[in-house]
Image (tube, helix red, strand yellow):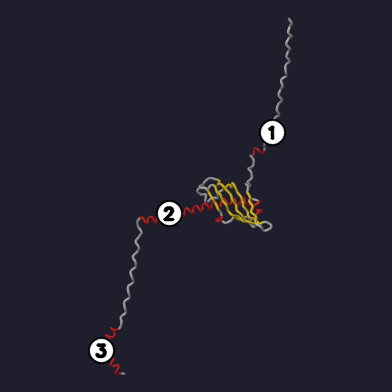
Amino acid sequence: MLAARRHAASTPAPLLLRRLSAQPKPQPKAAPPPPPPPPPSDEGAAAWARRAAALSLLGLTGAVAASAFSDLSVFLSCSSQAMEKATKNQQIASAIGEPIMRGPWYSASIAVNRARRSVSCTFPVSGPQGDGLLKFKAVRLGEESWFRFLQRSDWEILIMDAILDVRTEDGKRQTMRVTVADNTAAPPPPADCRTCKPRATPKPKPTAVPTPVPTSAPPPAQEK
């Protein structure tokens, strides 16, 4: 054993270096590939066309949203007045029961003129005993204002009909049509007419009949 150690110690250094050099050397890691070049910036007529199309689409979306909001405000204001008239109608209240509820706005149909001063609307209503549709035509009252979206508009309902689907006593369904008349009270007469008294009709005065004047008879003719 001592001889082996002496033999190892007597091994020349060049042989050890030759063994170390025979071992495989670690390969260097490959460098990552360079990042791709940035895409060329869009310039020229095509870029301006895309920007103009995006702005046009944005403006169109805003116009459609404003029109929808305006139609919704018109529907809410005029349908509220129609509901007031419907709840005061005895035929509708007895047919579908009370309370009478207005249906959702997305189930309604509305048509307005360009100035939004006249409207035709149809929307659903429901009650404990049945449901139906309210159809009416109305015109806007008052002056046009820039703040009409923030103010409650007054509408005059010209025509209003109710098409009701009610249950009969034998369990069948029956459709009935009710015309809602204008229940507004007539204006009171002027104050000066309340104290008016009927005037006596003047009697015609008798007309004087002229008395005939007697005339003398002509003298008799003389004989020759």
For label 1, the SS is loop
Q: Is residue 1 above or below residue 112?
A: below
The structure residue drawn at horizontal position 31% and vertical position 78%, both measured from the top left corner, is 27
Q: Position of residue 106 (x, y in %)?
A: 55, 56
Q: Amino acid at mark 3?
A: Pro
Horizontal side, residue 88 vs residue 24: left or right: right
Mark 2 or mark 1, whichever is nearer to me: 2
Q: Which residue is mark 1?
A: 199
- Where residue 165 sits, quadrant-wise, is bottom right
The amino acid beneath tag 1 is Arg
Where does the image place residue 62, in percent across and percent down from the top left? 47, 54
Side of 91 relative to 26 (left or right)? right
What amino acid does circle 2 point to? Ser
Where's residue 72, x and y in %?
53, 53
Residue at horizontal 66 percent and vertical 51 percent from the top: 91
Q: Which residue is mark 3?
A: 12
Please tell me whether mark 3 sits on a helix, a strand or a loop.
loop
Name the N-terminal-most of marks 3 and 2.
3
- Which callout, 3 or 1, points to the residue nearer the camera? 3
What number of labels is visible? 3
Mark before the other along the chain sequence, 3 or 1 = 3
Which mark is drawn over residue 141?
none
